[in-house]
Amino acid sequence: MGEAERGEAAPRQPVTYFCANEHRSVVTFSIEAQAPEAWDCPKCGLPASLDSENPPPAPKIEPYKTHLAYVKERRSDQEAADILDEAVRLLRSRRKSGEIIF
């Protein structure tokens, strides 16, 4: 199929983005479209900008937190000890009454 069968292509503009890893990505937009200030680099996934001298820095990635880490953020060591003591007392009282066999 040639251009005669499909019709004429819309006018386009190439826009070049630069990432912190010095990758250069050319993205084509319609002339009518406004090119975004930032674009994800297709090679490494880092954010890229129009400024080749000052590409955006890589985003800071927070390390994975365990459930225990989240609990320790909410509770002090003393609160945790109090909750544990209360749970142990409740368990022992239920065992004495025969409610729990093991």
Image (tube, rainbow, N blue to C red):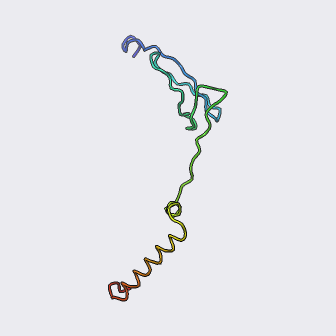
The relative height of residue 96 versus residue 46 in the rendered view (above or below) is below
Report x, y in % for residue 90. Answer: 40, 80
The relative height of residue 86 versus residue 23 in the rendered view (above or below) is below
- Write the residue at 53% across / 63% down: 72
Quadrant of the image occupied by residue 44: top right
Quadrant of the image occupied by residue 33: top left
In the current view of this chain or complex, which residue is farthest to the right?
Answer: 53
- Write the residue at 65% across / 32% down: 22
Quadrant of the image occupied by residue 26: top right
Q: Quadrant of the C terminus?
A: bottom left
**Image position of 53 (left or right of 101):** right
The relative height of residue 21 versus residue 26 in the rendered view (above or below) is below
Q: Quadrant of the N terminus?
A: top left
Report x, y in % for residue 70. Answer: 50, 60
The relative height of residue 99 versus residue 36 in the rendered view (above or below) is below
Which one is nearer the viewer's eye here, 92 or 53? Answer: 92
- Write the residue at 51% across / 65% down: 75
Report x, y in % for residue 80. Answer: 50, 70
